[in-house]
């Protein structure tokens, strides 16, 4: 049976995350419905590299698809897109090795978070607007304390008895682009709500409400503090999933265009 790799972008605002759920619209559910309509197959495998939460977006989620029928990849790409709503788009479809698994074969994942320093009419669904001044120097100092192999149990609602909470965070980058603050987090994998809580802590440090020296305490397993600082899903994007041999993206660019600064800002 042929296996395909799908690279997908979506705006997650209207959806209850990636994974199929009963009585809820999801990204996987919309794509699966389109494939079923096109192929008339009901028992096919569509598996994503990871879940994204309700309201979270993706610049490039990766999934594998296994069908009984064989279709040219380019034709399958066009036909699926014709059936999808405008806020979900298949970037490309390629034939994959029959053993390729979107989740198991991924070697790294990158998330991008966008914080806006001003109210915006164009990107409310794609940013977290923070009115308070943010000190990015302090945010970078706090971010450095999160890198490396650590236990992130305090930053997730996942059950540690069912799933390991050890995660390798390779790097955290913070860049200013006009009125936006961009945060990229690259790691082996990520736990439920982990990135949003990490960003929330960085924002608290940037505001001056939390000292950099107090950040390591929040990683302790018994700490319930990170949950209080969970950033909203609107600013979070799954930027890219990486597989063996693929180079990581070097530039950190905003999803929104950055308008010319106004004279009174």
Image: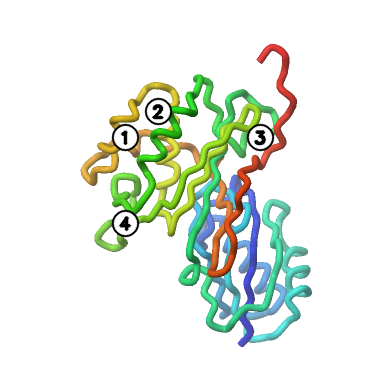
The span from disc 3 to disc 4 (Cα, nearest Å) is 34 Å
For label 1, the residue is 215
Label 2 vs 1, first from the N-terminus = 2
For label 2, the residue is 205
Give above or below for 146 relative to 247.
above
For label 3, the residue is 123
Specify the farthest residue to the top: 264
For label 4, the residue is 166
Q: Position of residue 55 (x, y in %)?
A: 54, 46
Label 4: few (<14), some or many (≥20) within 10 Å?
some
**Residue drawn 51% across and 42% down?**
173
The span from disc 3 to disc 1 (Cα, nearest Å) is 30 Å
Q: Position of residue 131 (x, y in %)?
A: 53, 21
Q: Position of residue 107 (x, y in %)?
A: 48, 65
The span from disc 4 to disc 2 (Cα, nearest Å) is 24 Å
Label 2 vs 3, first from the N-terminus = 3
The span from disc 4 to disc 1 (Cα, nearest Å) is 18 Å
Q: Quadrant of the C terminus?
A: top right
Tell me whether the residue at label 2 lies in contact with that at label 3, contact meaning CB atoms closer than 8 angstroms: no
- Looking at this view, is 55 or 170 the one in front? 170
Label 1 sits on a secondary structure element that is helix
């Amino acid at each position: 049976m042929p296996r395909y790799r799908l690279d997908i972008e979506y705006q997650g605002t209207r959806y209850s995350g990636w994974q199929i759920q009963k009585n809820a619209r999801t990204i996987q559910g919309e794509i699966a419905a389109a494939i079923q309509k096109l192929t008339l197959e009901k028992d096919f495998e569509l598996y994503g590299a990871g879940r994204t939460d309700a309201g979270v977006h993706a610049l490039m989620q990766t999934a594998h698809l296994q069908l009984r029928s064989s279709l040219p990849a380019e034709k399958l790409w066009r036909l699926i897109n014709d059936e999808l709503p405008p806020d979900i788009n298949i970037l490309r479809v390629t034939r994959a090795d029959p053993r390729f698994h979107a989740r198991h074969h991924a070697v790294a994942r990158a998330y991008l978070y966008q914080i806006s320093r001003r109210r915006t009419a164009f990107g409310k669904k794609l940013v977290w607007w923070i009115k308070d001044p943010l000190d990015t120097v302090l945010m970078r100092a706090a971010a450095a304390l999160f890198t490396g192999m650590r236990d992130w149990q305090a930053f997730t609602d996942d059950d540690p008895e069912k799933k390991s909470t050890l995660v390798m965070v390779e790097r955290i980058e913070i860049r200013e682009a006009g009125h936006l603050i961009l945060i990229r987090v690259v790691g082996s994998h990520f736990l439920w709500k982990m990135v949003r809580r990490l960003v929330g802590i960085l924002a608290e440090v940037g505001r001056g409400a939390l000292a950099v020296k107090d950040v390591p305490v929040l990683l302790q397993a018994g700490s319930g503090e990170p949950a209080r600082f969970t950033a909203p899903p609107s600013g979070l994007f799954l930027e890219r999933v990486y597989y063996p041999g693929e180079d990581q993206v070097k530039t950190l660019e905003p999803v929104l265009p950055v308008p010319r600064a106004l004279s009174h800002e």
